[in-house]
Amino acid sequence: MKIHLQKELDRLKKRLFHLSSLVEEILEESIRAVHEGNVELAASVRGKDQEIDRLEVEVEEECLKVLALHQPVATDLRFLIAVLKMNNDLERIGDLAVNIAAGKSCLAGDSRYPVYGEKLADLGQKARAMLRKALESLMYVDAEGARGVLSSDDEVDDLYHEFVQRVKADLSVDGAGVDELLCWMMVAKHVERVADLATNIAEDTIYTVEGEIIRHGRG
């Protein structure tokens, strides 16, 4: 029974890795689409999100099947619970990537404020690094690596608040640029939410490894 369970878990990890790789890919493309003003790339992101939705359902069905057939306990059970939660987080990151790519009114190629494209790219790089580290921590069962993700979230928050304060300053002096500036602010918020979801994944990884719930300041 244990051998069959391990095979099912290995298959599940492969599905999850495929899903996470695709999510990383469209997140990178969505930020690059806005930074470069690439409308075609933005459209490609929307198409790939449908594949993410399909994979999210497959991963959930696989988790539920393993739970029903093998009734796992201890670390295996915690892993499956964590996968069910982070599977949803990954699907939400895919949705956020679509929202980022949809920011056509602030595409840097036709922007009054190209500086925000650079700032968004920096913010996005850090959020993507958090996501990758969170997923690697799960795959390698690395609680310390997951804790490093939690520390990085403060840096992303600081960059986001700096971004927002600059937008507010520009809004106060440039009425003609309101639509574009508000668009930049919204896109930056989507990126900041990606970092929050990466933090969720890291927290679930720590739960998987240590059996400790650390949300809401615990741990």
Image (cartoon, rainbow, N blue to C red):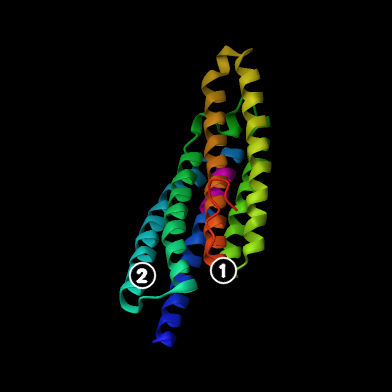
| Stretch of the chain drawn in magenta | 26-33
Between marks 2 and 1, how big is the CA–CA gap?
17 Å
* In-front residue for pair 70/214: 214
Q: Looking at the picture, which amino acid does disc 2 mark?
A: Glu
Q: Which mark is residue 156?
A: none
Instruction: Of the two numbered discs 2 and 1 on the same chain, state the one appearing first in sequence.
Output: 2
**Residue drawn 47% across the image and 54% down it:** 90
Where is 99 relative to 172, above or below? below
Q: Give yes or no for residue 27 being in the magenta stretch.
A: yes
Q: Position of residue 162 (x, y in %)?
A: 67, 30
**Residue drawn 33% across the image and 68% down it:** 64
Q: Position of residue 89 (x, y in %)?
A: 46, 52
Where is 22 relative to 93, above or below? below
Q: Which secondary structure type mostly characterizes the magenta part of the structure?
A: helix
Q: Position of residue 8 (x, y in %)?
A: 41, 78
Q: Quadrant of residue 173?
A: top right
Q: Position of residue 10 (x, y in %)?
A: 47, 77
* In-front residue for pair 94/76: 76
SS class of the residue under badge 2? helix
Q: Provide the residue designation for mark 2.
A: 62
For the N terminus, give its image quadrant: bottom left
Residue 66 makes an appearance in the image: yes
Left or right? Give the position of 60 relative to 127: left
Residues marked 2 and 1 touching at CB (< 8 Å): no
Mark 1 closeness class: few <14, some 14–19, many ≥20 residues within 10 Å = some
Q: Provide the residue designation for mark 1.
A: 139
Mark 2 closeness class: few <14, some 14–19, many ≥20 residues within 10 Å = some
Q: Give yes or no for residue 177 being in the magenta stretch.
A: no
**Residue drawn 43% across the image and 67% down it:** 80
Q: Looking at the picture, which amino acid does disc 1 mark?
A: Met
Left or right? Give the position of 168 relative to 17: right
